[in-house]
Image (tube, helix red, strand yellow):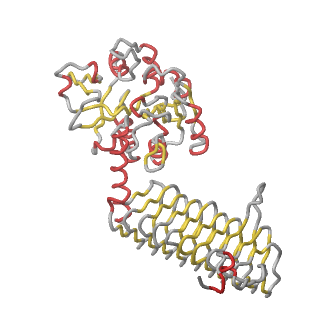
Amino acid sequence: MQRKQKRFGVLVLAAGKGTRMYSKTPKVLQKMLEEPLLYYPLSAAKKSGFDDIAVVVGYMGDLVESWLSSSFPDAAVLWQKEQNGTAHAVSLAKRWWSDYENVLILPGDTPLITSETLAALANRHIETGNACTFLSFEADDPYGYGRVVRDGKAVRIVEQRDASDEERKIREVNSGMYVFDTEALASVIDKIGCDNSQKEYYLTDALGLIQDDGGTVDSFKAEDPSEVIGVNDAQQLALAACVMRNGILGKWMACGVKCMDPASVWIGPKVTLGEDVVIEPDVQIWGSSSIGAGSRIGSFTAITDAELEENVSVVGFVRIKGSKIGRDSSVGPFAFIRDEAVLAEGVHVGRFVEIKKSLISSGAKVPHLSYVGDAKIGMKTNIGAGTITCNYDGEKKNITVIGDNCFIGSDTMFVAPVTIGDNATTAAGSVITSDVPEGALGIARARQKNIEGWYFRKKNIRGGSK
């Protein structure tokens, strides 16, 4: 029979509810380092060079499918409406994996698996010509795992619930990751029964059926057992997160990042860090953030999906989300930069400042106690304390434009839409509702009036004394 053109497909099983999570969110969408569990095996498969991937979804599958459409749009989505076991899921996907010579089957809840191990598993399968090669590991505590039981050349996997006392002593256990020759798998997948304590169709039963037909089955043992930690409850989720956090920090510190207290720092898997970055204690960096060389991130800062260029100083107690900070800029303490804000080169944003969806041009300063939203601030402009861009009129957001080299007096309110020309000044305490021309002084406040003797009249005191 002529072999298929495509050599490898990857099938990820992600249909389970995750009962032990006690959560309304499906297990594979539970967050670990701010990425869903499912992100990790999919990323490892992609990094291993496997491009043809399908994901079996089931419980709250619409949510899983929605996430896949945005994060892994090339992955095929297959449905398992009723979750009757791993073999049932694989059987439903038969039409998909039949287009490949081999299918790599992965659980969606093993986030620590590496691309190197997956590539080695696939290579071992090809080199040996096995009908099935599965990934095993030596467990210090094998409780809960399927035991790898060997009888001569025959290999079978016995689930914890179905294992004898003697079999439960075995420390080599199944990871739930397999490579099958698809012709061998197709010949047995529909023969698998559910005569077990769970009344489910176990994919492990395929191994015995393949061997009965004369096919060869063997294991490939993972060198690092931590790679195949499965996540079934909140404690295992926390354990896996710590293992990955330590690995990520170790990688970056080996590249020159200085991390003062690794135990209190959390960095996501998609983050990139430059040389000589210094990270103080109690920092979180998530999503697709990048931190440029020579930058310093102060304590109690959280950065998500943000780009910081070289030599940026984040003083501390800062939140940066979905924004860009230019080189040689400084931010904080107690600042919030969010929603596509852009700080150009050499900008200073200081204490208790919020910048939202605004451009702060090179050399500009917003030192303290200000809100700048939906605005463009020109080069070398100084924004005085207490300045507010009043961008929302109750129906829509409006734009404030402030030119280059402007001096904005303290406690100025800009009622947008409004434009301030270059080299303009606003007087402290002004409410600016109209444009201010280039080089002009804008004053918009009531004239001060002192009422003599007002206190005494109010208290009905004659002559200023009792």
Q: Front-most of 463 and 285?
A: 463
Residue 98 in the image: x percent, y percent? 53, 26
- Position of 383 with respect to 191 (left or right) is right
- Position of 368 with respect to 394 (left or right) is left
Q: How many marks?
A: 0
Where 333 sits versus 2, above or below?
A: below
Q: Is residue 213 visible?
A: yes
Q: Residue at x 38, y 40 (%)?
A: 123
Q: Residue at x 55, y 77 (%)?
A: 329
Q: Residue at x 35, y 37 (%)?
A: 230
Residue 80 in the image: x percent, y percent? 53, 24
Q: Front-most of 143 and 441?
A: 441
Q: Front-most of 276 and 104?
A: 276
Q: Is residue 9 visible?
A: no
Residue 105 in the image: x percent, y percent? 43, 32
Give the quadrant of residue 162: top left
Quarter of the image where the C terminus is located: bottom right
Where 399 sits versus 165, above or below?
A: below
- Position of 282 with respect to 34 (left or right) is left
Residue 248 in the image: x percent, y percent? 38, 56
Give the quadrant of residue 409: bottom right
Where 282 sits versus 406, above or below?
A: above
